[in-house]
Amino acid sequence: MMGLRRGLLVTTILVPCGAVGLAGRAAAQGDTIALEQIDVVPVTPVGGAGGAARAETGAAGGALPLSKVPFTAETVTARQFEQDRATLDPTFTLARTTPGVSLSDGQGNSFRQTLTYRGFDASPLQGAPQGLAVYQNGTRINEAFGDVVNWDLIPQVAINRIDLVTGNPIFGLNALGGAVNIAMKNGFTWQGQEVSVMGGSDGRILGTLQYGEVVGPWSFYFAGEGLKDDGWRFRSPSEIGRVYADIGHRTPDSEFHLIASGAKTFFGATSAAPVDLQRLTERAIFTNPQTIDTEAGQIQVTGKVNLSPTWDLAGNAYVRRFSQFVVDGNDGNFENCSTRSSFRGFLCFEDDGFSPAPGQTQAQFRNQFLILGPNGQPIPFRAGIPYGTHDTVRTEATGYGGTLQATNRDRVFDHANTFILGGSIDAASYTFKSASTLGVINPDLSVTTDPNNPTYGLIPGLGTGPIRTAAALGVAPSQVIGSNLYMGLYALDTFDVTDQLSLTAGARLNFARISTQDLTGFSPDVTGTHFFTRLNPVAGLTYRFFPWLTLYGGYSESNRAPTPLELACANPNRPCLLPNSLVADPPLQQVEAHTYEAGIRGTVPDVAEGGLLTYKLGFFRTDLTNDILQIAVPGNAARGYFVNVPATQRQGIEVAAEYVGERLRLYANYALIDATFQFRGDLSSPNNPLADDGLITVRPGNKLPLVPEHQIKAGFEYAITPQWKFGLNVAAFSSSYFRGDESNLNRKLPAYAIANLNTSVQLTRNMEVFALVTNLFNTRVPNFGTFLERTEPGELFANRYALNDPRTTALIQPLSVYGGMRVTW
């Protein structure tokens, strides 16, 4: 267990009904365990930045007792992440425990999965609609370009707790479905020294270390993680290195922390694979290389000062640097220029995804798709050559900003009252560069570029520089610089009408300015500045009928500004090879959300020999207007553009219960998530086998793809002896539709269940051995799927494979076994 020092064991346990924790503290004799309740959750980003030490006292700025919070809050603590330590993946733990959370593995790597909560995404994929705001120690970590969330950059061993908070616009942009608030450890919340080493399936080796100490008013904490494995698919290694350090200073009236963190990760073969190839081997990948190399570093200062017995001031400031380099081998979708063009016999890009401008002749229209080499020369077409592209993308961003917040707890009309007033600013500058080089798809599906090799059918001396179409449509190098400025002002007040009834009301004003500039001259429409503002209110109440029963309900609004990527790729006549090209930007509208929540929850003490039972029953509904979707065009599933659609909706039910006793922890929960479109219209989905001339018709009530409607999760951990613990958990998900099947016409992804087993044995006071088995029953089904362009009858992809099935999927990671040892002192 974490935090073992001088015979003291502190264990923090998740309570699914929301941010209620239990700390188990071993008595001197080691037989009796006293349970104390922690019942405080963050209602602002700053409220989750102080760690458990402040939250346990209820003194953290922006934190309230759960009994006064009129929306849902879920908490996962360090104890649960420790149970899954061999994964080094926080999304794994969130998905197996938290109602409404599911994962979709669009890249075939467990460290790069999209986390979906109530039908809203927090994803590392550029172009995915980001519907969750994510904070680490009060700092927003949705990246500047695309609002993506790179879960692989977060040091798992240093996580103290993660709170998922819904229905609260105080968390700013992207909090459509809620906010993920990550509070990290520091020397005041964790003391000791610990080293872990682990190994297991697919050649995985990893190690973690952490050190925490308090010296007078000072605290020191350091954590490091390293992982390397070969991956369970071909050419899919993973390499992770992460460090985290915190220096803190505390007085009776203040607490400050200087925090530094850094991460470097590398992943290979990050994509789904055609079903036809998976039938040959489950380890199949598609065209490659497909590697992602990411680096990030952040320096942060956080602080809190008690100005008086009823006033405190809290805030943070940060600077963050992000860099990512992507190498992607793809099908080029090139062919002999049409007889209706002026360049028959030369190489052209497919033109069936585009429409001619008014007055254009066929020759004028088709001449735009002539492929030009790095020196601007046309490239002769040669039959039988499986042309591909070697695409590179580099994204870099530097962000900085901070939040300042005041909290007052003066009584109003002799009633308890908590008033919060704050403001935030997040600014970032970024660069985005991409280019495509002509290559060939080899029989092993690797894409290589070597014009000196005569089998390529290319012109000797062509060079390996960037290629483009004559009109820079679809295929063209890009170089974009830009900046974002996000500002917010918020106020929130919770007033106790009686000892049982509390009313909450507040609002946040969001302002966003997004500027982009094209440096290539190929895409002048990219250059522009866009402004978005909105005032989002929140109101709700809680009523505590009994100490063990509370009713809550609320209404809130939130918004999401279009990302720079979406703004720069919103013209169906100039689609992007996502994320490899940026082109025209007719303005998109911001997404607006209206959320309604209600439910009951509570904690029942002294159940079954002194244990605690927690429970929740909740209902929610979120209506979105101007939701943003990524739409495909013919020829390549990765090529597309973004559009606003009139309306979507997420609604559902969550039921959860957990029992924590002296030797047994047992939990179960169920979530119904009905995520649907609420409009009628045609969308482009050319690779959908049931599309009509490339279009599918969406009707009100059609399900959103990749969102399982039903989720059931259950698990237990039992102390067989004081030294030996054993646990088993199961998560089951119903079927969902493929991306690209928004009309719900095709066969769905199958329902599936995943079981995981964990056990640990405390050999001595300072040494523990442990094991983790994931996917215990080796479930071999996909949790992600989309469509690709099928080969024509009689044709072979890369002159070797017949791709007759339009489906491309990513399977769940197979049965994996890990084991290790941890030493503490």
Image: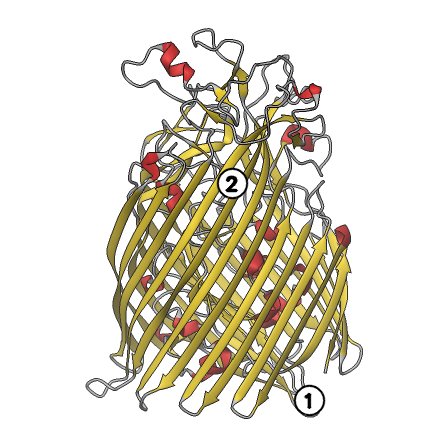
Q: Is residue 386 above or below residue 641?
A: above
Q: Residue 429: percent from the left, percent from the top?
A: 40, 54
Q: For mark 2, what is the residue?
A: 736
Q: Residue 413: percent from the left, percent from the top?
A: 19, 86
Front of the two marks 2 and 1: 1
Q: Residue 822: percent from the left, percent from the top?
A: 74, 73
Q: Residue at x 63, y 56 (%)?
A: 730
Q: Residues within 10 Å of mark 1 (few under 14, many from 20)?
A: few
Image disc number at residue 235: none
Q: Quadrant of the N terminus?
A: bottom right
Q: Residues within 10 Å of mark 2 (few under 14, many from 20)?
A: many
Amino acid type of the residue tagged 1 in the rendering: Arg
Give whichever of 491, 617 is nearer the camera. 491
| Left or right: 287, with 481 as reference point | right
Q: For mark 1, what is the residue?
A: 6
Q: Residue furthest top?
A: 339
